[in-house]
Amino acid sequence: MHIIHLDVDQELDKHLAGEKYSESLQQALQSIDPADITGITMKTGSRADAVTLSHFPVLKLLITRTVGMDHIDLEYCKKQGIEVKNILDYGAFNIAEHVFALLLSGTRNILSTQKEIHDGTFTFKGHLGVSLKGKILGVVGTGRIGLEVISRANAFGMKVLAYDVYQNVEAQKERGFEYVSLVELAKKSDIITLHTPLLDSTRHMVNSALIQLMKDGIILINTARGELVDTAALIDNIKKFRWIGLDVLEGEKDFTKDHPLLKFQNVVITPHVAFYSDASVKKIAEETARMSV
Ligand code: NAD
């Protein structure tokens, strides 16, 4: 087997052995000889489309070190007999931890106090926090990540409402939350966190109509996909939100310092880092090595 690892950043580089490149598949094609390459591992920085893959005459295995596979032409791979594998779970707890980092940074004024601190002012006045205990958390999507979030919400003493097209009754009993409709979740929640994949049915699920139903002072956290939220509607209704924490943005690949959400004090944005931790990088390296043999 001749396997190459593409899109390797410096952290993964420390844990993954073998022939590694920081470049994407498209960039690496300029310098490597694809003639005897039988396996490729990559991330979403690479596009495994038919034209690119046709340069690899003996390719047998394609591994994406991601959950999603929308950057791969699966039909082409099937026709050519190329086995495609992905990493199903590199630690849903990482994303759940990041949900609470985004949430607590707002509810406990971690970010909003920094300017005064740097100006030499040390006072609690004007920085009233929001307790999580007793608050209603609305979890949209009770898959791997949603359930990890619910476990942590239980530890904070929150009441959890959930919405999913598929109801996981066993998890509901185990973790003691209640399934409701999306409308009821929007109306009753103090905090809403999104954990569904991006599908036609979930695109812009947080839109103007849903926002109108929400309580004033609602908190929204999105670590799933930016396109779940209609950003224009969010901006139109920005005063309704006490706090918005986003790890993902609509069209995040084209992000610039002129992004319209940056001018609001009640919005915090992180650059799609929820998955990225010491634990997940190790796990991704281990899974990649295991699947490569
Ligand atoms: P999962 O497949 O385990 O769970 C998704 C859940 O969404 C399922 O329970 C499914 O039934 C539900 N669902 C599907 N369509 C729905 C709809 N129309 N309405 C309501 N619920 C619906 O996925 P997961 O591992 O929990 O990941 C959730 C999402 O988080 C991923 O799809 C991905 O977009 C995102 N994600 C983000 C990061 C990050 O770094 N920010 C990392 C990993 C995953």
Image: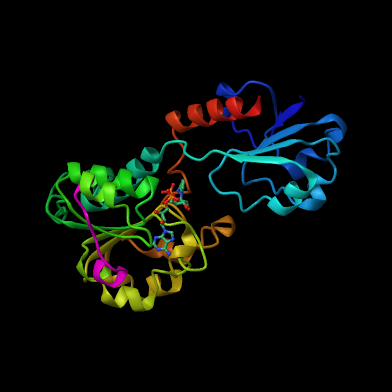
Name the image quarter holding the C terminus. top right
Which is more toward the observer, 290 or 79? 79
x, y percent for residue 262: 42, 61
Return the residue nearer the eye: 97 or 2.
2
Residue located at (77% from left, 38% from top): 28
Q: Is residue 115 in view from this perspective? A: no
Residue 191 against residue 89 in the figure, above or below? below
Q: Which of 36/80 is in front?
A: 80
Work out which residue is located at the far front of the displayed protein and give it.
170
Say whether residue 141 is left or right of residue 44: left
Q: Quadrant of the N terminus?
A: top right
Find residue 214 and report its horizontal and vertical position in percent. 26, 71
Give left or right: position of 91 versus 134: right
The number of numbered badges drawn on the structure is: 0
252 up-or-down from 288: above or below: below
Please tell me which residue is depicted at 48% across the width and 48% down the height of the picture. 272
Give the magenta part as a residue range.
Answer: 175-185
At a point 27% along the width and 69% down the height, the residue shown is 186
Q: Nearer the viewer, residue 125 or 278?
A: 278
Residue 175 location in percent, x, y?
22, 46
Q: Is residue 251 left or right of residue 242?
A: right
Q: Is residue 255 above or below residue 201?
A: above
Residue 59 horizontal side relative to residue 94, left or right: right
- Is residue 23 among the parts visible in the rendering? yes
Instruction: Let me know if residue 87 is in the magenta part.
Output: no
Q: How is the image coloured?
A: rainbow
Q: Percent x, y for residue 10?
A: 58, 29
